[in-house]
Image (cartoon, rainbow, N blue to C red):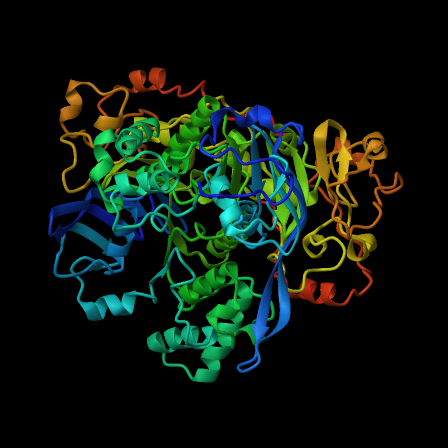
Amino acid sequence: MSSTTPLLSVKDLAVSFATEDGIVRAVDEVSYTLAPREILAIVGESGSGKSVTVMTLMGLTRGVNARFGGSAVFGSTDLLTASEEELQRIRGNDIAMIFQDPMTSLDPVYKIGDQIIEQIRAHEHVSKAVARDRTIGLLDEVGIPRARERVDSYPHELSGGMRQRVMIAMALSCNPSILIADEPTTALDVTIQAQILERIKQLRDSTDTAVIIVTHDLGVVADIADRIVVMYAGRIVEQGTVDEIFYDPQHPYTWGLLGSITRLDRERPRRLPSIPGSPPSLLDPPKGCHFRPRCPHEFDRCQEVPPLEAHVGEAPGHLDRCWLSTEEKRSRREVGDGQIGLARPQETPA
Amino acid sequence: MTTGEPPSAGATPEVGTVGESGAAANGESNGSLLTVDHLKLYFPVRAGVVFRHEIARVHAVDDVTLRLRTGQTLGLVGESGCGKTTLARCLVRLLDPTDGSIKFEGRDITHASTREMRPLRSEMQIVFQDPYASLNPRKRVGQIIGTPMALHGTPKDEIPKRVRELLARVGLSPEHVNRFPHEFSGGQRQRVGIARALALNPRLIVLDEPVSALDVSIQAQIVNLLDDLQDDLGLTYLFVAHDLGVVRHISDSIAVMYLGKVMELAPAEALYAKPIHPYTSALLGAIPIPDPELNRRRVRTPLEGEPPSAIDPPTGCRFHPRCTHATDVCRAVEPPLMQYADGHFAACHHPQNVTAAEIAGATRSEMSPLSAGESDGSASDARSDGSASDDRSAEPPPADGRPAGSADDVRTDEAPPAVGSTE
């Protein structure tokens, strides 16, 4: 991964918002890179800063109360300091975004075709007819049946899954090199979710688009991601390839996250393993490691913030933010009768 | 707590002592707390500016028969629009059924008036999906939990103590009584919603997607809490969910709904181990496994398209336009709910994961929809490979389907997203 030049490199990103109650440090010391054709998943619970991280890349968190630190370099542009004009060229054209809720992210009073045509014509000097033909092609590509008729539909005439496909078509309309998907399937049924994820994978293969997918669902991550960034309370607690995170998780929060998902392919445990407590307020986060108050393995050193470093010798790209030694981690992480997928599956599933 | 005659049944309501030890009182319904027979709920679709007239009906719940056993949990699963929430709300009479009957402890409450329902309200409570929308933002938590008690005649001076007990019971600090809902996180709010439902010592709690809006680590906490409460208080749950993940943990049996009908009903583990209905298999197959290696190995046949409209549901089996096993009989005849061994029910002409002997031994259940035809689960059709091989390696349906009117339109309506194996 590190040999290729990254498409996007985020370094020490910090975002804070001044509120009436004080300063909220939504994102702190976040660094990651995105390689071409890579699908990177950012995982975390609500309030972990995962959405703020990606919205900042698009300049969507700018405001009088927002403060930024670090850098996010795309090509030769730092997205944090770029002017609004520069950003406007990049947005949609080079980096496109799909939002969580397809019900509210389309304009209800315009036909879906016109909304996509508008975007194409905003970035390229093409005639309406050409843009319309391309729109039909795009709708077809994302799996909307009878695209030639549907292009004149209003958003309310489409189901949630279809609307999300329209969002994807719109995002792809200018052949972006990065597609950011913020919880793209959370609002959808599992059967539709499977279709949309399959579609995103196919698009990566056919168009070479790199994808950042933000989600809280580790099942989705296991299905689609190449690499994973796990966030907790504004910081990255662990990052690595999908196999590293699932088969050799290093951070106790990741263990808890992996442990609390229901596994249909396993015996059902008597009790669902869960992480006690709830995430801290970012107005007044705990000193040191943010996960400390909920962590069963906490000790005195956790009062200091652990650095995000590689601890697993054979995997230099596998970083985590925890003071425990690798041996301690490996011996302690069995959660709830070994419910986490620590061992690679041996036999082919029946 | 006011006067209330139960509509039929003749038994007098246990005024004042609604309660915990009532499990023995329901002799008639042999262990079932709530029985639902051939329940239908249609929503009218109206048109016209001056003369509003009905132009169509949404078949939200269409001939559903269920039994809720005392102290057990029935999971109710289906995609959005399948009628599961409508059914859940209808059971506690928040919606009025179009046809069929609902009996609570043998008493018919199908058409009970608001006043007749009032004493029963303390016995059946509901927890809603969205903990942000279901708590009044202007009321303090103490008021939210205390109001039902005040309305049902708990002496005023006992309420604060009981509220504190309930808060502790659901894992919140009793000092939180004076907080407003916005001061809590999503998981904590859902705990408040559960405390409110528990306030009147109910026997039945309808849980309408209680954890869908919560983070995974919090979901597990809430599910464990619900589990404990059930063990301690002997509660009966109807647990509504949109996927088969969480529901497995809490349910004794699970009903799978599609477009207003029950497709399969089975003891929880049997449903996962041996799904008989192709729709159940499809739902199970759509859930991503949180294990990258297994995901890569898994060959998937994703379910195509989306559920058709419930205004004009497909003829015959409602699932046939999306089913890989569908044949002519599925388009023409609605399959009855057949009872297989070990309390496993399924409504399908082409049952999966069962042997020919099991099919031969299956009997038509009295829970079948009244409009269902004869089963075509004839031995000739019972594919002997069904039991042995992977049920997901389904053969494609025969190409020459009899063009069956609306059903065929639905077919063309669907997206065929390249049937893809993950690898």
Residue at image position (34%, 17%) is: A332
Residue at image position (64%, 69%) is: B56
Which image quadrant is residue B220 in? top left
Residue B273 place in picture, x, y as percent: 64, 30
Q: Nearer the viewer, residue A51 or B297?
A: A51
Q: Is residue A113 left or right of residue B30?
A: left
Identify whether A119 is placed above or below A62. Answer: below
Res B407 visible:
yes
Q: Nearer the viewer, residue B38 or A278?
A: B38
Residue B178 place in picture, x, y as percent: 21, 39
Q: Nearer the viewer, residue B44 or A79?
A: B44
**Where the C terminus of chain A falls, by quadrant?**
top right
Identify whether B423 is placed above or below A332. Answer: below
Residue at image position (73%, 41%) is: B367
Q: Is residue A219 left or right of residue B398?
A: left
- Residue extending farthest to the right is B380
Residue B395 place in picture, x, y as percent: 76, 47
Res B301 visible:
no
Q: Is residue B178 left or right of residue B367?
A: left
What is the tally of numbered marks visible in this picture? 0
Q: Nearer the viewer, residue B252 or B217?
A: B252
**Where the N terminus of chain A falls, by quadrant?**
top left
Residue B52 place in picture, x, y as percent: 57, 77
